[in-house]
Image (cartoon, rainbow, N blue to C red):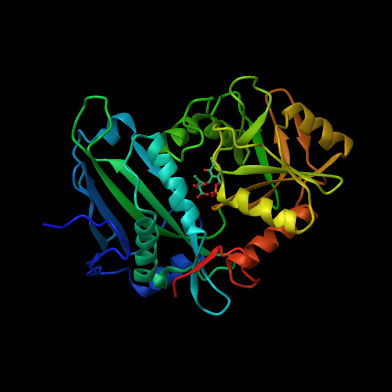
């Protein structure tokens, strides 16, 4: 019987894949990985039982997981996840970007969803164990990385509505290239009439339910030819919140930046926080303050606003070129990537890939 793990380093059992993917098939995937469609040979699994805690940490072959049809997650969506990337560094090493920040946000999400917290060291070690096991899965394409998806779900077979007494924590890895398929230099946004999150809700948590609620508006955006959906606040329906899977920054003509504040209804993005620091280091003023759709349109039209960009782990830093709502449409700047957007993107990517000094301790080397 496995004993509960409470302190780092945790003990992981390793069960190597008996028939990992053939090297030529893998090489083909790694040359053109896209986003979220291919998965590496292994995954991490850790179990939780009330009264026992976290136990049975293991690295096992990637594959289907047994799940009772009554598992609470299938009925009441008690599930949270994270997204972070491992990079091949300029010197051939491997590093994660700010995994401790993902571990902390994972636990904030866990608390909001009435789930047990996971020792931060266990979260980080689980990700490290998987990256080490699947170190041959780094894309060869320019800008590629290994996207890690840690997640936790309620596995107890019980239909009463109360927090589950059993959970699984898993980590899977997916080689990643560009998040956006279009390959366009700047993305197009659709302003949704649907709300993503309301005050007092789960908007600040990274739970699957938030994304389920965003799928109809996202499908609407896609069917109208846009790349991402933009959500306004649920109360006044005028303040810009965030995109389906990214935070937003607005660049003013004076070089200052504005980004919506963290008020509990948007995800506290780790890329967002990192960019605020980098922009301030560049001497740019950054204001975390509310910005309305009407003001955005007026500023883009008058030239008071020159750039807008989306940011997130998957999207990195992506310029926004055009914004469309049910009643209006406007273009940002020239409709293509702006200079400040490109500069901040380059700064961030250079740190993530070990090409610039890591003065913040963000780069977590694992090999
Ligand atoms: N907002 C939403 C809704 C997201 O899904 C994400 C992606 O994780 C972000 C923002 C950006 O967060 P991060 O920079 O931590 O990836
Ligand atoms: C990420 O950037 O990690 C995300 O989770 C965004 C999206 C893929 C859901």
Q: Above or below — where is 72 with respect to 5? A: above
Position above or below: 111 against 272: above
Q: Horizontal and vertical percent for residue 111? A: 39, 38
- Count how many numbered circles sit on residues in the image: 0
Q: Nearer the viewer, residue 320 or 347?
A: 347
The quarter of the rendering in which ligand 1 is drawn is top right
Direction left: furthest residue: 1
Regarding residue 189, the answer to whether it shows in the image is: yes
Asked if residue 64 can be seen in this view, the reply is no
Which residue reaches farthest bottom? 91
- Which quadrant of the rendered structure holds the C terminus? bottom left
Where in the figure is residue 363, as x and y percent of width and height? 54, 66
Q: Which residue lies furthest to the right in this view?
A: 302
Q: Quick check: 220 left or right of 289?
A: left
The residue at the point 43 percent across, 40 percent down is 109
Quadrant in the rendering for residue 225: top right
Position of the N terminus, as image quadrant, is bottom left
> With 118 as the anchor, is 233 left or right in this view?
right
Residue at point 60% right, 20% down? 235
Q: Position of residue 161 (x, y in %)?
A: 26, 25
Q: Residue at x 42, y 68 (%)?
A: 137
User: How far from the left and from the top, in percent, is residue 283?
Assistant: 79, 56
* Extreme residue in the top direction: 236
């Amino acid at each position: 019987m496995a004993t509960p793990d409470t302190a780092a380093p945790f003990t992981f059992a390793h069960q190597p894949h008996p028939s990992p993917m053939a090297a030529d098939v893998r090489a083909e995937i790694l040359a053109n990985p896209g986003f979220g469609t291919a998965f590496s040979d292994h995954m991490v699994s850790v179990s939780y039982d009330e009264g026992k805690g976290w136990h049975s940490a293991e690295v096992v072959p990637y594959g289907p997981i047994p799940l009772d049809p009554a598992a609470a997650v299938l009925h009441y969506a008690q599930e949270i996840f994270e997204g972070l990337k491992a990079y091949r560094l300029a010197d051939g090493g491997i590093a994660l970007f700010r995994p401790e920040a993902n571990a902390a946000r994972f636990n904030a999400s866990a608390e909001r969803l009435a789930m047990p917290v996971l020792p931060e060291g266990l979260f980080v070690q689980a990700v490290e164990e998987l990256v080490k096991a699947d170190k041959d899965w780094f894309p060869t394409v320019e800008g590629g990385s290994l996207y890690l998806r840690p997640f936790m779900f309620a596995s107890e077979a019980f239909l009463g509505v109360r927090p589950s007494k059993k959970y699984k924590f898993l980590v899977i890895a997916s080689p990643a290239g560009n998040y956006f398929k279009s390959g366009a230099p700047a993305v197009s946004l659709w302003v949704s009439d649907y709300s993503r999150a309301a005050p007092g809700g789960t908007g600040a948590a990274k739970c699957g339910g938030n994304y389920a609620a965003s799928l109809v508006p996202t499908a609407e955006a896609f069917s109208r030819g846009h790349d991402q959906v933009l959500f306004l606040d649920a109360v006044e329906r005028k303040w810009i919140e965030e995109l389906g899977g990214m935070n937003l920054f607005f660049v003013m003509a004076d070089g200052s930046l504005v980004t919506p504040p963290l008020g509990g209804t948007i995800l506290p993005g780790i890329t967002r926080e990192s960019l605020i620091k980098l922009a301030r280091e560049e001497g740019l003023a950054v204001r975390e303050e509310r910005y309305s759709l009407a003001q955005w349109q007026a500023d883009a039209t008058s030239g008071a606003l020159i750039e807008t960009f989306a940011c997130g782990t998957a999207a990195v830093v992506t310029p926004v070129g055009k914004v469309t709502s049910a009643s209006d449409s406007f273009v940002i700047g020239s409709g293509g990537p702006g200079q400040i957007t490109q500069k901040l993107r380059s700064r961030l990517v250079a740190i993530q890939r070990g090409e610039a000094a890591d003065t913040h301790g963000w780069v977590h080397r694992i090999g």
